Image (spheres, grey):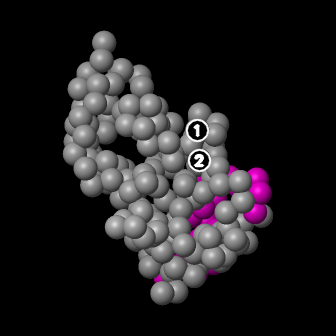
């Protein structure tokens, strides 16, 4: 039995019909066509599905879509504004922190949540913040450098 929900996604008011046990991840990808959010593990261990829910980083595979009725969601697509990449997106490119790219959207949104709450984190704080986001390609050093580069601005 599908239920209507209203939410603000990337600054736009949206209304969709969701199943009671449908995840936010599936609603974003399949109902709204926002495929930047990736499913890696489906059980909250990899961080690939990270989005911002009211400014806080959450694993969208662990949140039911029905729970976000009336809430604000930001996906990786929402960071690209007026033809410009977000500074984190650009820093990831500049520092070579993007390899296969599968973890990148979740990593960037986790970094954004960190920088929004702590604009000048230490390296240790960055590493702790991204600890729930797995990357099998980069070894994390380039990712950390990219986040610190934006934090230093």
Question: Residue sitting at 42 percent across and 63 percent down?
Answer: 80
Q: Which residues are magenta?
A: 120-138
Question: Residue sitting at 52 percent across and 79 percent down?
Answer: 150
Q: Nearer the viewer, residue 19 or 81?
A: 81
Q: Residues within 10 Å of mark 2 (few under 14, many from 20)?
A: many
Ranked by sequence position, the earlier of labels 1 and 2 is 1
Q: Which secondary structure dominates the residues rendered in magenta?
A: loop
Asked if marks 1 and 2 touch (Cβ < 8 Å), the reply is yes
Q: Residue beneath label 1, please?
A: 39
Question: Residue sitting at 37 percent across and 37 percent down?
Answer: 32
> What residue occupies the far top of the structure in this picture?
1
User: What is the x, y in percent for residue 15?
Assistant: 23, 34
> Is residue 131 a member of the stretch shown in magenta?
yes
Q: Residue beneath label 2, please?
A: 48
Q: Residues within 10 Å of mark 1 (few under 14, many from 20)?
A: many
User: What is the x, y in percent for residue 140?
Assistant: 72, 66
Q: Is residue 108 left or right of residue 40?
A: left
User: What is the x, y in percent for residue 74?
Assistant: 38, 53
Rounded to the nearest angstrom, the CA distance separating label 1 from label 2 is: 6 Å
> What residue occupies the far bottom of the structure in this picture?
153
User: What is the x, y in percent for residue 29?
Assistant: 46, 36
Location of residue 127 by image quarter: bottom right
Quadrant where the N terminus lies?
top left
The reply to whether residue 1 is visible in this rendering is yes
Q: Nearer the viewer, residue 148 or 27?
A: 27
């Amino acid at each position: 039995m599908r239920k209507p929900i209203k939410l603000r996604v990337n600054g736009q008011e949206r209304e969709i019909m969701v199943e009671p046990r449908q995840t936010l991840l599936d609603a974003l990808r399949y109902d709204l066509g926002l495929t930047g959010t990736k499913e890696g593990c489906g059980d909250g261990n990899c961080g690939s599905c990270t989005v911002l829910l009211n400014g806080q980083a959450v694993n969208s595979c662990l949140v039911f879509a029905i729970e976000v009725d009336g809430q604000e969601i930001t996906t990786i697509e929402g960071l690209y504004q007026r033809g410009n990449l977000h500074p984190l997106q650009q820093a990831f490119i500049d520092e070579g922190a993007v390899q296969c790219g599968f973890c990148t959207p979740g990593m960037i949104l986790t970094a954004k949540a960190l920088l929004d709450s702590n604009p000048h984190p230490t390296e240790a704080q960055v590493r702790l913040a991204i600890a729930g986001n797995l990357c099998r390609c980069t070894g994390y050093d380039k990712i950390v450098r990219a986040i610190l580069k934006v934090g230093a601005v």
